[in-house]
Amino acid sequence: MEFPDCSYILLNRPLALLLILITGCCTLASLQAQQVDWIEVQNAQVDASFRGIAVRDANEAWVGGSQGTVIRTQDAGKTWTPVTLPNADDLDFRDIALPQPNLVVLLAAGEGKKSRIYRSDDDGRTWTLTLANQDPQGFFNAMTFADANHGWLIGDPIDGKLDLYRTTDAGKTWQRQIGPTMLPGEYGFAASGTNIVAVGRQLRIATGGSAARVLRSSDGGQSWEASETPISHGNESSGIFSIAFGDPQQGVAVGGDYKNPDVDHGNIARTTDGGVTWSLALPTGQIPHKACVRYLGGKIWMTVGRTGVAVSYDDARTWQTVTKQGFFTFDFDLHAQVGWLAGSDGHVARFTLPQQ
C-alpha cells in the first residue's frame, strides 16, 4: 500500500510528550497546549492491523499484527525492516516480548492451531515454533515475562479454567499449569498483549465478558484469588482489556465496551493495595474505551485505544486526552524514556518523555 508523504512529529511541551506518527494518516488531532511543533518524517510502508509491540531501547522496537506482519526498527523509526516467519502469512501476531538481548518471542492469537509461540535468539534471522495450541477451543491472549527467563502465557478458558502456560527458559519450552476457575461467560481479550502482568512472582490477570475481575497469584500461578472491579462489563464485548502496575501496590486497569467505544464512564480503575480492591479513576466518566495502559514513571500513566490517547500525571486519579488518533497498543522503555504506539492500517508512532 502506498502512503502519502505527510507524517509528523508532535511536541507537546506542557504535556512533555513527543509523538512521531509514521503512518498513512496525515495529521493527529490537535493537542490542547500552548505550543505545538510540527516536523515532517518518513512513512512506514506497511498495511496491517497492529496489536503486538515491544520496545528494547531508544532505537529498537518490534511491531506485529495481522497477515503475519512483523516489522522492526533499529534506528528510532528512520527505517523499518519486515521480518519474515515461515508459514505465518495467515497469523495474527498480538504480543511480542524481548526478555533478553537478541531474543524475540512472538505470540500469535487465533482459533486452535493458529495460536502459537515463535522464538528467535538471533534477532529474528531464524525462528523456532516452540508452542502450538492443540485444543480447538484454545485461543491465546497474551504473555508476560517477570525476568529474562520466567514467563507466563494465558488463553481463553478451556473446560471452565483459564488456559495457562509457564516457561522457565525464556520461551524455549512451555509447561501447562492448572489455571484459575473462570465464571460462566468470563474470558480475556487478546487486545494488546497486556491483560496479564508479572510483578516479580506476583501475577495479575484481567478478565472481561460476564465479569471484570482481576485474578491474583503470589506464587507464580500455583494458587489464585479474585477481585471484582467497577470496570464496565456484562456482555461479550466489555470488561477489562489491559492492566499495568507501577510497583507491587499501585495498579491501573482499563477497558469498557469495544462495540460502544464512545461510552465514557466505567473504563478506568485504580488500586493501591496490589489489586485487592479497585475504584474508578473518574467516577463521572470523560475517558472512552481503552485497550492498553502502561506506567511511564513517577506519577505518569498513559492509556490508548481506538478512541485516542490519554495521560495521567497524578497516579491515574485524573486523565486528559492527548489526541483522538486511535492506537491499539503501545510499549515504553523506562530507562530510555522512549515509547512506541501502534494501531490499525499500519499506524505506528513514537513518543518520548524528558529524562527524569
Image (tube, rainbow, N blue to C red):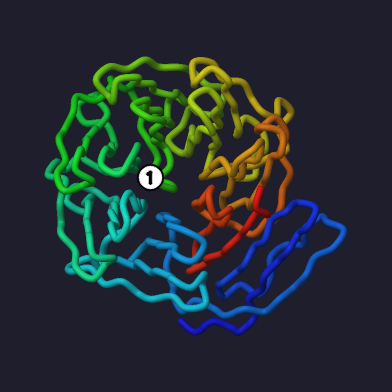
Q: Is residue 227 above or below residue 233?
A: above
Quadrant where the N terminus sits is: bottom left
- Determine the residue positioned at 29% across, 20% down: 219
The spot of residue 121 in percent (x, y) is: 22, 60
Badge 1: residue crowd in 10 Å (few <14, some 14–19, many ≥20) = many
Depth check, front residue: 93 or 75? 75
The spot of residue 102 in percent (x, y) is: 29, 61
Q: Is residue 79 above or below residue 300?
A: below
Task: Farthest residue to the left: give it.
Answer: 134
- Determine the residue positioned at 54% across, 78% down: 43
- Determine the residue positioned at 57% across, 75% down: 24
The amino acid at mark 1 is Ala
Q: Secondary structure at mark 1?
A: loop
Depth check, front residue: 77 or 23? 77
Give the residue number, with chain letter if any, for mark 1: 190
Depth check, front residue: 158 or 68? 68
Q: Which image quadrant for residue 299?
A: top right
The spot of residue 5 in percent (x, y) is: 61, 84
Could one spot residue 195 in this view of the protein? yes
Task: Farthest residue to the right: give it.
Answer: 34
Q: Is residue 310 above or below residue 235?
A: below
